[in-house]
Image: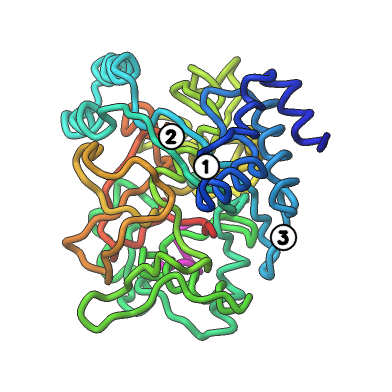
Amino acid sequence: MPRGIALLILLFGWPVCCLLVNVGPASAVAAEKKNKMASEPASARAPFDARQAAALQAVWSESLGVPVAAKNSLGVKMVLIPPGEFLMGSSEEQVAEALRMAVELKIDENTRKRIRETERPQHGMVIARPFFLAETEVTIGQFRQFVKQTGYMTQAEELGTANSADPVKAAAGKGNGFNWRSPGFAQREEAAVSQVTWNDAVVFCNWLSAQEDLPPAYQRDKQAGWVLQEESNGYRLPTEAEWEYAARAGSSSTYPWGPDAAPGGRLMANTWQGAFPHRNDGALGWVGTSPVGAFPPNDFGLVDMIGNVWEWTTTIFAGRHRLGEAKRCCTPSRGPVDPDPAVSQVLKGGSHLCAPEYCHRYRPAARSPQSQDSATTHIGFRCVR
Ligand SMILES: [Ca+2]
């Protein structure tokens, strides 16, 4: 018996493993399907714990014949995320709790409205196939390699402006010269890159694909701009569903690590510490972005999914979760695509600028709209393939 299957039996019992030998009708197509099902491990079904997450990764790793985590050409560790089902969005209880907290902390009505509306309704989501997600956000050092090789200029560099690192001065951000090299605070090569637009992120993903002779995930169309190539296995930005599923890593709690933001006082993510926006004590001493991996990993082994920088996704923002759309997610929906101020992409995860009394968004269910041409100190990205 393969070691992975034995692990599944140990953790989930025989009923789950019986799915591995499901029998279908006796036609050629059904036989092929049967063989596929017989050879594929069972999908994950949230909630599951750290031990189960590791076992699922191990059994899928064995089935696919690839490591659970392996470095790519850029030295980025790509982590195998097994397919599975989970509840996406916030439960009614979690929304009520977030709103109770919002009232207590006197959070503005706009933020309350977002919590009240955008994370609902909670709904089942199926991630139909395994994928590989970068362990970390793209770092300054990695982005520098891309720029060095291509001579690429980010949109903020071309415009000569980006948002200010100081939230108090953010409104006066025109012509400030901030960009990924100089976001407005000191940063190390291992820090998450920021001040990059959705467009910059797409170009980076295509470059990374080219490094590995993979077809580009985005192709430029004169009318439509960047168009996602669904059949490509190149690097791209994750869908919102992929991102949330990977960030939860089996957890159904408010935070991936449990119900409390800082269990026992332990900081779990790079979020604003202090009285926003006038005093920032820095999370673990990091003011602004932190080096990736400075905070504990989640149960899939991913770091900084919550906090540090918000992360671009390939999903277009809608005010509520659209239940009418196909539930079997993984392949992103087609489109949008050029940097268009009128189109907002979903951001996930919250950032170093997120304080409880300001946004309370460093939760996997939280989502924020951002126009494709925005470059700010608190938005970055990671790639998937
Ligand atoms: Ca992040």
Q: What residue is shown with label 1?
A: 305
**Percent x, y for residue 92?**
28, 17
Labels 2 & 1 near each other (Cβ < 8 A): yes
Mark 3 vs mark 1, foreground winner is 3
Q: Quadrant of the N terminus?
A: top right
- The answer as to whether callout 1 falls within 8 Å of ligand 1 is yes
Q: Quadrant of the C terminus?
A: bottom right
Kind of residue at disc 2:
Pro
Mark seen at residue 101: none
- Please name whichever residue, 129 or 299, is drawn nearer the observer in this view of the structure: 129
Q: What residue is shown with label 2?
A: 364
Q: What residue is shown with label 3?
A: 71
Which secondary structure dominates the residues rendered in magenta?
A: loop
Residue 245 shown left or right of residue 315 in the figure = right
**Callout 3 secondary element:** strand
Structural distance between the alpha carbons of marks 3 and 1 = 18 Å
**Percent x, y for residue 65?**
74, 53
**Vertical placement of residue 196 versus 38, above or below:** below
Q: Earlier in the sequence, mark 3 or mark 1?
A: 3
Labels 3 & 1 near each other (Cβ < 8 A): no
Structural distance between the alpha carbons of marks 2 and 1 = 8 Å
- Membership of 343 in magenta stretch: no
Residue at point 71%, 21% (across, down): 11
Kind of residue at disc 3:
Lys
Q: Which residues are magenta?
A: 179-185
Residue at point 41%, 40% (across, down): 350
Structural distance between the alpha carbons of marks 3 and 2 = 25 Å
Number of numbered discs visible in the structure rendering: 3
Q: Is residue 352 visible?
A: no
**Percent x, y for residue 165?**
39, 54
> Dot 3 surroundings within 10 Å: few (below 14), some, or many (20 or more)?
few
